[in-house]
Amino acid sequence: MSDLPGDRAKRSRRPEGRDVPHGPTTPWTPACGRTIGRRLLASIYGAKFAAMRYATSIEPITVLKTKSAELVRRTRRSGEPIIITQNGRAAAVLQDVETFERQRRALLLLRFLAEGQRQLNQRRGIDGARAIRRLRRRIEGLRGAGAPPA
């Protein structure tokens, strides 16, 4: 039995002298990187997203401290987020600005759609023809007041 970092399982000795594995793999060995990623994704996004393998890059916070410029370059180049862990748990996400802004716009659109759906469900919505008539009246009112149309 070797004590190299790549061993698949952490082991201890029973009184009889047999090796006993502790869990399927040790937390940060290269052999279990994918397992850790799936577990983290399942805990963050739910099992459905873990199966989709949304984020494939997971780094401990010490790597962020020592190689931050490299991580920023990597996330800019790939457009994929990097999950930063602290004490073995997901703590933060490093993401490029373009992807972040695109996600914020998409989230805002979804919020507007959800609000519209909620209003329709409460019978507070109006049909398209009525909305167009209201907008035309507003525009005419603004023109009459001397304000340029928006």
Image (cartoon, rainbow, N blue to C red):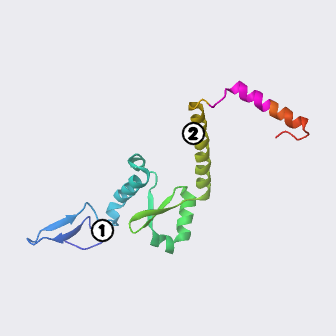
Front residue (pair 140, 30)? 140
Q: Which residues are magenta?
A: 124-136
Mark drawn on residue 6 = 1
Quarter of the figure with residue 8: bottom left
Can you name the residue that lies furthest to the left here?
Answer: 16
Q: Amino acid at mark 2?
A: Ala
- Alpha carbon of mark 2 to alpha carbon of mark 1: how far? 49 Å
Quadrant assignment for the N terminus: bottom left
Q: Secondary structure at mark 1?
A: loop
Front residue (pair 105, 13)? 105
Residue 130 drawn above or below residue 86: above
Please say whether residue 127 is one of the residues in the magenta stretch.
yes
Q: Amino acid at mark 1?
A: Gly
User: Residue at 91% across / 39% down in the picture?
Assistant: 146
User: Residue at 84% across / 39% down in the picture?
Assistant: 149
Residue 32 drawn above or below residue 52: below
